[in-house]
Amino acid sequence: MDPSDWQESPLRLEDLRGELIRQEVTILFAFIERAQFARNDAIYEAGRIPIAGYSGSFFEYMLEQTERAHALAGRYMSCDEHAFSGGLPEPLVSGERYPTPIRPNDINANAAIRSGYFERVLPELVEPGDDRNYGSSATCDILCLQVLSRRVHYGKHIAEAKFQAEREAYGVLIERGDAAGLEQQLIDKTVERGVLERVREKAAIYGSEPGLPGACRVSPEAAARLFEDFIIPRTIEVEVDYLLGRLG
Amino acid sequence: MDPSDWQESPLRLEDLRGELIRQEVTILFAFIERAQFARNDAIYEAGRIPIAGYSGSFFEYMLEQTERAHALAGRYMSCDEHAFSGGLPEPLVSGERYPTPIRPNDINANAAIRSGYFERVLPELVEPGDDRNYGSSATCDILCLQVLSRRVHYGKHIAEAKFQAEREAYGVLIERGDAAGLEQQLIDKTVERGVLERVREKAAIYGSEPGLPGACRVSPEAAARLFEDFIIPRTIEVEVDYLLGRLG
């Protein structure tokens, strides 16, 4: 879609809130699922698990194959979805296209999401070791990456809604190309504390296992930390990038 | 693997219990994830969403593509995993093969799991309607089917452990080919009541949303009913089938 053909339509922050809360649940479920397996380093090392005609890691192979399947089925036609792999096939699915509520753009933060997932998230979720659950671990990693990507890129919607609510304040900062100013304008510490509180509470609930009192598969503090230092900052970066291109 | 090359190794019911309890959580998470979207009948009707060079439904297409990716990565080399689609490619992954704890067999209950999912499970999870979340709904359906399949086919492990614990009683029934007798021998109403109680409790916990008191995305009664009338009976069928071939 050509950005010049785009028609703005009203987007309100209150209407996005339910989706954000839902995504927190999906993220925590994905984290808890991954946490049941060991780290399984073998799946991340190129060539360690031999794959005919492929030189990358087992995880990489599964990610590419999964995204290939989803690309054919049209997943990345949606403005909410962003692929990690390059060179994916064109979708075979056709159908009506719906108007997009955000300005068309090619912002893709998946490189940062992917490296952050392996550096920050995975070490909080799993114990070192090898339990040979390679396929299950990779499937869970892919799900974690996909839901993190969805949540971080949802920042585009949030930024569009915030822009519509305060055109003047954002307009000045955008005209100036003031990324630091936009970041300051976007951050709302009160809302953020609410998110962290909710994440802590949800991790405690969803991580509990009736019959095993006290078991928490992902510690509430670790879950809140991942939102605080990783998910929220990456989301703000996407919001800033989106706004910098909003008037172009 | 040729069944005649198989070496029995000890399998104890107590050691399988943790895996069964974990699978209940995974199943409930998958149900709750699907429950956030509408029924979206369009994805199940052949030709309704046009796919170049394909005449089936969108759901079918996504299932086949997903299983194709997983087959290449070796998912169905494991005795725990069973595909829904036919004509899948050979795995490209190679690696050490581990001894299987169950007798090699070609029992695959996925046809019954699939029809039961659409007839019994899905109507309990979703509201009729179309919210255009086609890709997400199909992805969740596939996850639900995969985790249900894993749990039902885990009956092979359960049956093997029960057989090893009571060789004589099972041996007589197997020699006679007495399917009804085996079913009676396998069913343990006390254990089953425990499972249903745990599922009810977990559905209430995992379905709750802090800040929305009383919200239950999948009703605890519906979840328990699905285990009672669908998941447990299909598991018992697999156990009976496995035992009938145990001594051959």
Image: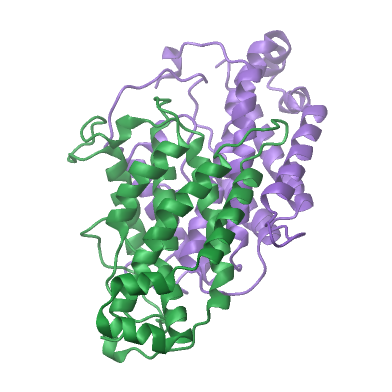
Chain colours: A purple, B green
| Residue at the outermost top position | A168
Left or right: residue A115 compared with residue B176: right
Q: Is residue A57 visible?
A: no
Residue in the picture at 29% in, 38% down:
B58
Left or right: residue B242 compared with residue A171: left
Q: Which of B52 and B34 is in front in this view?
A: B34
Residue in the picture at 56% in, 50% down:
A144
Give the x, y percent position of residue B176: 26, 82
Q: Is residue A222 above or below residue A160?
A: below
Q: In this view, does B201 lie above or below B133?
A: below
Give the x, y percent position of residue B27: 50, 53
Residue in the picture at 60% in, 35% down:
A22
Give the x, y percent position of residue A45: 52, 69
Left or right: residue A215 compared with residue A44: right
Give the x, y percent position of residue B68: 30, 56
Q: Nearer the viewer, residue B68 or A82?
A: B68
User: In which quadrant is the C terminus of chain A drawn?
Assistant: top right
